[in-house]
Structure formats: C-alpha cells, structure tokens
Image (spheres, rainbow, N blue to C red):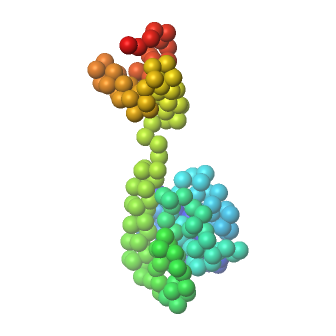
Amino acid sequence: MDQIILAFEREQNNQRVKELLERSGTADCLLCTSADQVRRTVHKRRITAVLCGCKLGEQSAQLLAEELPIFCSVLVLAPQDRLELLADGDICPLPMPVSRRDLIQTVRMLLRIGRRLERSDRPRRPREEQAVIDRAKQLLIDRNGMTEEQAHRYLQKNSMDNRERLIETAQMVLGSSWEME
C-alpha cells in the first residue's frame, strides 16, 4: 500500500485523517510534526504525497511544497478563505469541510500522479552502469576523436549488432587495448 505523510498542527486532525485513509485502504499514513521532519521523510522514503494544513509549525505549506522533490505532491486541507491566500500552483487545495469520499478520491489521485512522477524521476539504469558507459564513451572520444553523440551511437550499434546490453559493450570497449579504425 502507498504511504502518505500527514502533517497537521493538531494531533487530533492527524489521527482522524489517518484512521479514515488507513481504514479505507487508501494509504499507510506517516505522521510528521514539523516541516523539517516532512522533508527528511520524503527524501528518505521517497514519499509521493503530503497532506497538511496551510501551516505546519514554523513553515507554510507553500514554502514546504517548494522544497520537496518534483514527485511529491502537497494536498492542503483548509477552509476556503485560507486556501485563497495560497499562490502556489504546485499545491493541490482541498476546501474544508470535505466529504470522506472526496478526500479519499483526491488522495488516491495524488498517489497515482506521484507514482508516475517518481518513476519518471528515477534514472533508467543504475548509476554504476551509467558510469561505465560514460567512461567508455570518453575513451572513444579521447582515443578516436569521436563526438559524444558518435561515441554513443557506436556503443548502441555494436550492442545491437552483437545482441548485447549496452553495459556489456561498454565494458568490452574499456577492456580492449586495440585501436578502432
């Protein structure tokens, strides 16, 4: 089940929303008591959604949203007059009072969006593999006077011709001592 951070100033609000979201099977809820704790938890666990009020202790929801990664959505639950003061388009406002159904549907939507954004934010290949590929390209550039694009195409073409993964071709280039034509 997805996880969401709840960060309301009042503990009672955290507990009520947590009970609703967990009982409905929408999300496991992590409770945070400060904006700093929210930031640390989002980065450590790659949480994709935060549900809070307009203000979280020492910081506004708007400032918090600006400091979070792109894959993390912020849902602000507050009275309409307070939501109108928020100027950030990155925040999803939800006016109170809100029905259980609307809250659950909104959280589910944000979690789906967050999963998509989180996937697109991940590197396509592990860093170690990318480092090997980059070293192989640099070797081709230095040794054979290729451009970065030519070196990349060379690795790709040889990889496809030999039915190997790109990393295997890069390792072969790095391990070889011969000069290319």
Give above or below for 59 relative to 113. Answer: below
Q: Can you name the residue that lies furthest to the left here?
A: 161
Q: Position of residue 163 (x, y in %)?
A: 30, 21
Q: Can you name the residue that lies furthest to the front here?
A: 145
Give above or below for 115 relative to 78. Answer: above
Q: Position of residue 83 (x, y in %)?
A: 52, 84
Residue 10 horizontal side relative to residue 176, left or right: right
> Which residue is nearer to you in this view: 53 or 71?
71
Residue 55 horizontal side relative to residue 162, left or right: right
Q: Position of residue 2 (x, y in %)?
A: 46, 57
Q: Residue, x 40% and y 61% (percent of image)?
A: 113
Residue 16 occupies quadrant: bottom right
Give above or below for 134 relative to 164. Answer: below
Q: Residue, x 49% and y 65% (percent of image)?
A: 73
> Which residue is nearer to you in this view: 1 or 119?
119
Query: Residue 32, can we see it?
Result: yes
Q: Quadrant of the N terminus?
A: bottom left
Q: Position of residue 76 (x, y in %)?
A: 52, 76
Q: Quadrant of the C terminus?
A: top left
Give above or below for 27 relative to 13. Answer: above
Q: Residue, x 40% and y 21% (percent of image)?
A: 169
Query: Residue 18, can we see it?
Result: no
Q: Residue, x 58% and y 79% (percent of image)?
A: 54
Residue 103 occupies quadrant: bottom left
Q: Can you name the residue that lies furthest to the top here?
A: 178
> Which residue is nearer to you in this view: 115 or 105?
115
